[in-house]
Each structure stands twice: as structure tokens, then as C-alpha cells.
Image (cartoon, helix red, strand yellow):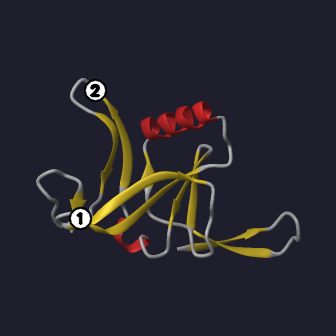
Amino acid sequence: MSADAIDPGTGTAVQERAHGVTLSAAAQEKVQSLLAQEGRDDLRLRIAVQPGGCSGLIYQLFFDERELENDAVVEFDGVGVVVDAMSIPYLDGASIDFEDTIQKQGFTIDNPNAQGSCACGDSFS
């Protein structure tokens, strides 16, 4: 998915790439809180899929200041979520949430493309 935007510096159309990942309100708040603690406004949340784990693929979720040529970026109320071109097909329709309960604290990824996962829940296929 892509869209044209206008580069304010040149006034020309720039191709922007989008992705199908969504970010819940709870995840947005947690990301904004973590960025405020870091004191940086140049970081974005990057989600990627890499080979590894006992089921074949693992998620990587981290803050990144870089934006590579084929990255897709979507803004969620001031929080930029970046997905690299290779990960887009694996993450289309995925949603990132944040849980803060007695049983669990952390980011979770609900991915309709995952056909199976390992017993420890760290990887998927």
C-alpha cells in the first residue's frame, strides 16, 4: 500500500509506503511514556520479523532513529510505527497492544498471519 504526499521543502510528490500494522491506545500511551523517559523525539517504534526461534520466525520490537529506503511508516497519534519491506507481508493485519496486569506486563502482538507458535510463545510460523 502506498500513497503520495507532498514534500514541504520541494513541493513535489513523494511516495510514502504504508503497512497494515495497528497500535492500540494502550500501546500508544506506553510508547509515548517510554519516549518521554528517553527524552528523545526522533525515535520510532520498529517492528520486524526475522528468522529464528523454534517455530521459524521471531518478532523484533525496538526503538529506531533510522528510516531505511523501503520502510513503511504509519503515525498513530504522534507515535511512528516502522516496518521494513521484507516484514510487511508477515505483519499485514497484526496489532500491537500493551498489557499491564498482575499476570503479565509487556507488549503483545496479535498476528492473523501466524499459523502456529512455539510453546514458549517467542516465535511463530
Side of 84 where 108 appears, left or right:
left
Occupied quadrant, residue 55: bottom left
> Quick one: quadrant of the C terminus?
bottom left
**What percent of the width, then of the height, locates residue 78?**
62, 44
Q: Residues within 10 Å of mark 1 (few under 14, many from 20)?
A: some
Q: Relative to 2, say whether 44 is above or below.
A: above
Which label sits on residue 101? 2
Which numbered tag is attached to residue 50?
none
Residue 105 is left or right of residue 47, and the answer is left
Residue at the location (58% across, 75% down)? 70
Is 56 situated left or right of 50 in this image?
left
Please identify the residue farthest to the left as the structure is shown.
Answer: 119
Where residue 69 appears, as percent x and y from the top left, is 63, 75
Q: Mark 2 to mark 1: distance in Å?
A: 25 Å
Q: Earlier in the sequence, mark 2 or mark 1?
A: 2
The amino acid type, in three-letter code, at marker 1 is Ala
Q: Position of residue 24 (x, y in %)?
A: 43, 43
**SS class, disc 1:** loop
Q: Tag 2: residue type?
A: Thr
Q: Which mark is residue 114?
A: 1
Q: Residue at x 35, y 68 (%)?
A: 50
Q: Residues within 10 Å of mark 2 (few under 14, many from 20)?
A: few
Residue 48 on image: x %, y %: 42, 63
> Outermost residue, right direction?
10
Q: Nearer the viewer, residue 107 or 51?
A: 51
